[in-house]
Amino acid sequence: MNPILARYTVSVTELKRNFSHIMAQSDGAVAILNHNKPEAYLLTAAHYQSLMEYLEDLEDAKIILERAAEKAEKVSLDEL
């Protein structure tokens, strides 16, 4: 069984009928069910943007950790 990763769920049919109302009632993420199984997730633009920013932060943290293990070299401003 597939887990449902959203607090709010709707059927495809219900989504077609009441899109605006469903998005207004959701907390940013809606699981779209097809035959009672999660088929897709619908995110508000703000929720999607915050996820993308979070992923960027994680990627930056990974780079920082990788570079922390590198040996530092002293250079002058003229060499840059």
Image (tube, rainbow, N blue to C red):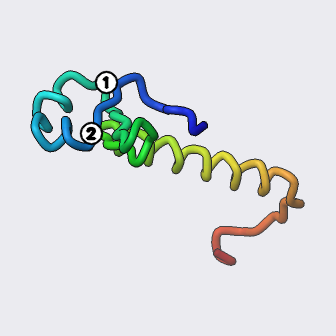
Dot 2, how many residues are within 10 Å of its Cα: few (below 14), some (14-19), or many (20+)? some
Label 2 secondary element? loop
Label 1 secondary element? loop
Give me the disc on residue 27.
1
Residue found farthest to the front? 35
Q: Quadrant of residue 45?
A: top left
Determine whether 68 is above or below 19 in the image: below
Dot 1 or dot 2: first in sequence order is 1
At x 55% / y 44%, what residue is drawn? Answer: 57
Drawn side of residue 59 relative to residue 74, left or right: left
At x 28% / y 37%, what residue is drawn? Answer: 11
Q: Quadrant of residue 80?
A: bottom right
Frontmost residue, 64 versus 25? 25
Q: Amino acid at mark 1?
A: Asp
At x 61% / y 51%, what residue is drawn? Answer: 60
Dot 1, how many residues are within 10 Å of its Cα: few (below 14), some (14-19), or many (20+)? some
At x 49% / y 32%, what residue is drawn? Answer: 5
Drawn side of residue 13 relative to residue 80, left or right: left
Drawn side of residue 65 relative to residue 80, left or right: right
Frontmost residue, 26 versus 63? 26
Residue 14 x %, y %: 19, 35
Look at the image and tell me in which quarter the N terminus lies: top right
Frontmost residue, 14 versus 28? 14
Determine whether 41 is above or below 30 in the image: below
Give me the disc on residue 1.
none
Residue 17 x %, y %: 10, 38
Q: Amino acid at mark 2?
A: Thr
| CB-based contact (under 8 Å), mark 1 and mark 2 | no
Q: Which residue is mark 2?
A: 44
